[in-house]
């Protein structure tokens, strides 16, 4: 496992020190309030740990896409109230990220107090990872903590540059994420099963290419499975299918063969002629019996049972992408069933299960098992890039 320092490597007493803490406060908003504060809850332990040790904590975050200019609607002050509610602490909003205003704020803050800097992305130096911009921020701090794994795939001043300028530490959420990812793909117990589903192969080609070299079982579900089935000569009717990618699909299956990775495609599927809740045309059939006017919207019960059996022989599961169009019942059936099997195996202690991806997180929550997986990543883009086997600049900078 890559080596990085954590809050455990910091002294117990941080009074008089200023901690610059990169967090993800890019909250979904509805009518001026966050509609989901999961991201704040995730960084709460880090913030309170540093504060309890007496550090002055300066939170750094981006909010929206202001593209290097101030926009009052994209100020981090928009989420100040939400952050205060989750932390159950008052925080001071600071409408700059460097300079005399920040100096003055720091002089007003007492030990253990928390400040919130304005949106880093108001300044072009943030996304450009401008060393002068990073230096301007760094001069206000004694140490740098990165607790925003979800931004770690970007080499920005606050996610990468600062780590070169100050003693750097992974926050608690970052630490948990890195440990979970390491247990899933870095240094996993074998055999490993990867489940890749979702709508399209084109968005996940790099993921598939990396996984066939890393895992023993690759399950392809969702709309992606249709492209792979088509590549094998199956007529998928009106299903979502990228016919231009069938050669690519065949190449991935060849690579899997060479690497000793078993690719699991469904033998049976759930089809309908219209995409609706419980449509009258709903039926389950063998993949070779799909009619020209039908769409494959989920994988079938036999396929799910076979996957459950294969999963029971595995020690590690990494999952991205639902197996079917899970938002529309009953096309959630396969996803829910496999999620519950994985959750039960995890709770029995025989499986390490790590999942991520926006819709995947929603699907696991829908199945009621999000808390029963070993780890569920809400990091989106960073999680996918990690599944692609890419080095994440924010992580690399911490693990120098
Ligand atoms: P994630 O956000 O977890 O990475 P994706 O965005 O790749 O997942 O894919 C999720 C979407 O794929 C869902 O909206 C789901 O409805 C869709 N999907 C899954 N299976 C099918 C299918 N057979 N046909 C059409 N859409 C599908
Ligand atoms: Mg998605």
Image: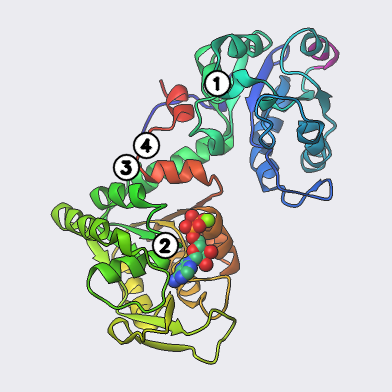
Residue occupying image coordinates x 17% and y 52%: 259
> Would you call the spot at circle 2 few (<14 residues within 10 Å), some (14-19), or many (20 or more)?
many
Identify the disc placed on residue 390: 4
Please say if 51 is above or below 13.
below
Q: Is residue 321 visible?
A: yes
Q: Nearer the viewer's eye, disc 2 or disc 3?
A: 2
> Would you call the spot at circle 1 few (<14 residues within 10 Å), some (14-19), or many (20 or more)?
some
> Would you call the spot at circle 4 few (<14 residues within 10 Å), some (14-19), or many (20 or more)?
some
| 81 relative position to 99: left or right | right
- The reply to whether discs 1 and 4 touch (Cβ–Cβ < 8 Å) is no
Identify the disc placed on residue 197: 2
Q: Please state, as top left, top right, bottom left or bottom right, where the C terminus lies in the image.
A: top left
Pinpoint residue 205: horizontal percent, then vertical percent.
34, 51
Residue occupying image coordinates x 64% and y 32%: 23
Residue occupying image coordinates x 46% and y 38%: 178
Residue occupying image coordinates x 49% and y 24%: 5
Q: Is mark 1 within 8 Å of ligand 2?
A: no
Q: Which residues are magenta?
A: 105-110
Gap in angstroms between the C-alphas marked 4 and 2: 20 Å
């Amino acid at each position: 496992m890559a080596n990085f320092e954590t809050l455990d490597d910091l002294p117990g007493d941080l009074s008089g020190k200023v901690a610059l803490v990169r967090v993800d406060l890019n909250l979904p908003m509805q009518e001026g309030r966050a509609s989901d504060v999961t991201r704040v809850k995730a960084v709460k332990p880090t913030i309170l740990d540093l504060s309890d040790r007496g550090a002055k904590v300066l939170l750094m975050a981006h909010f929206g896409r202001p593209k290097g200019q101030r926009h009052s609607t994209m100020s981090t002050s928009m989420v100040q109230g939400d952050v205060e509610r989750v932390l159950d602490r008052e925080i001071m909003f600071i409408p700059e990220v460097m300079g005399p205003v920040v100096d003055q704020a720091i002089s007003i803050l007492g030990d253990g107090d928390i400040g919130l800097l304005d949106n880093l992305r108001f300044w072009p130096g943030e996304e450009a990872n401008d060393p002068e911009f990073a230096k301007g921020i760094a001069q206000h701090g004694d140490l740098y903590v990165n607790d925003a794994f979800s931004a770690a795939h970007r080499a920005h001043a606050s996610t990468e540059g600062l780590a070169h300028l100050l003693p750097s530490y992974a926050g608690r959420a970052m630490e948990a994420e890195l440990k979970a990812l390491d247990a899933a793909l870095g240094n996993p117990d074998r055999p490993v099963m990867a489940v890749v589903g979702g709508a399209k192969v084109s968005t996940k080609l790099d993921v598939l290419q990396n996984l066939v070299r890393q895992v023993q079982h690759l399950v392809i579900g969702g709309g992606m499975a249709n492209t792979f089935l088509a590549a094998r000569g199956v007529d998928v009717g009106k299903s979502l299918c990228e016919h231009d990618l069938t050669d690519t699909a065949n190449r991935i299956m060849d690579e899997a063969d060479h690497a000793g990775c078993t690719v699991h495609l469904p033998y049976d599927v759930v089809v309908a002629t219209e995409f609706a809740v419980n449509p009258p045309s709903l039926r389950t059939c063998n993949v070779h019996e799909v009619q020209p006017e039908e769409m494959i919207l989920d994988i079938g019960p036999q396929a799910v049972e076979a996957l459950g059996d294969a999963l029971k022989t595995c020690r590690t599961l990494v999952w991205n992408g639902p197996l079917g169009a899970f938002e529309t019942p009953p096309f959630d059936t396969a996803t829910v069933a496999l999620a519950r099997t994985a959750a039960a195996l995890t709770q029995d202690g025989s499986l390490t299960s790590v999942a991520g991806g926006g819709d995947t997180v929603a699907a696991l929550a829908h199945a009621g098992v999000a808390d029963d997986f070993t780890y569920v990543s809400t990091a989106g883009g960073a999680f996918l890039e990690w599944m692609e086997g890419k080095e994440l600049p924010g992580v690399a900078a911490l693990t120098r």
